[in-house]
Image: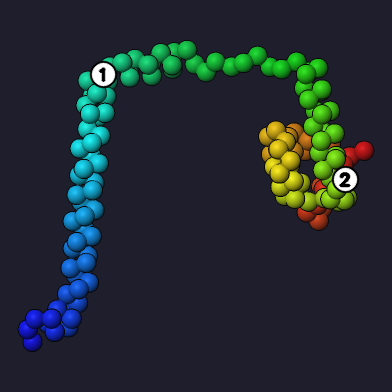
Amino acid sequence: MYGLEAINANNGWAISALGISIVFTGLTLLSLSISQIHKILDFWENRSDFFDRIKSARKNGKKTCPPLSTEFRSLDMAKTVMEYKLLTDRTGVPFSLPRVLKMAKKSGLHRPHSSINELLKAGLILPDGDGFFYWNE
């Protein structure tokens, strides 16, 4: 067998396609690495600045913001309770948290996962044991 018959019989087309794709991928990676080499060289030249920034960040530690006053948190919690009660009134009691989360996201409420977590921590929303929740009146 010679010519195209031999190529067909011995998977020549697949081997040539694989070879072309390997060469193309290699050339693409080479061009990307060459185009980004200036960033690597810049980092290498200024590596002492980078390490100095890391050391100073470790010395300073994390800067924490002062805790919010209890008055502000209670006002915020009252607003959150009102917003989520309106949502759960539409779904009925007992309600499903995933459904309430979905509705909160659609409504554009601020940080729905955190808000519901705070309501659960405060004991304002209680589980009924069957995967649903209700308000603690």
Identify the residue shown where x is 13% and y is 81%: 4
* Above-or-below relation of 54 to 115: above
Between marks 2 and 1 in the image, the one whose residue lies nearer the viewer: 2
Identify the residue shown where x is 81% and y is 35%: 83
What count of labels does the image hold? 2
> Farthest residue toward the left?
2
Tell me if I can see residue 123 in this picture: no
Tell me if I can see residue 45 in this picture: yes
Tell me the residue that label 2 is attached to.
89
Q: Is disc 2 in contact with disc 1, using a CB cutoff of under 8 Å?
A: no
Asked which colour scheme the image uses, the reply is rainbow
| Residue 83 - label | none
Give the image location of residue 127, x and y in percent.
81, 47
| Residue 46 - label | 1
Q: Amino acid at mark 2?
A: Asp
Q: Quadrant of the N terminus?
A: bottom left
Give the image location of residue 89, x and y in percent.
87, 45
Q: Element at badge 2?
A: helix
Q: Element at badge 1?
A: loop
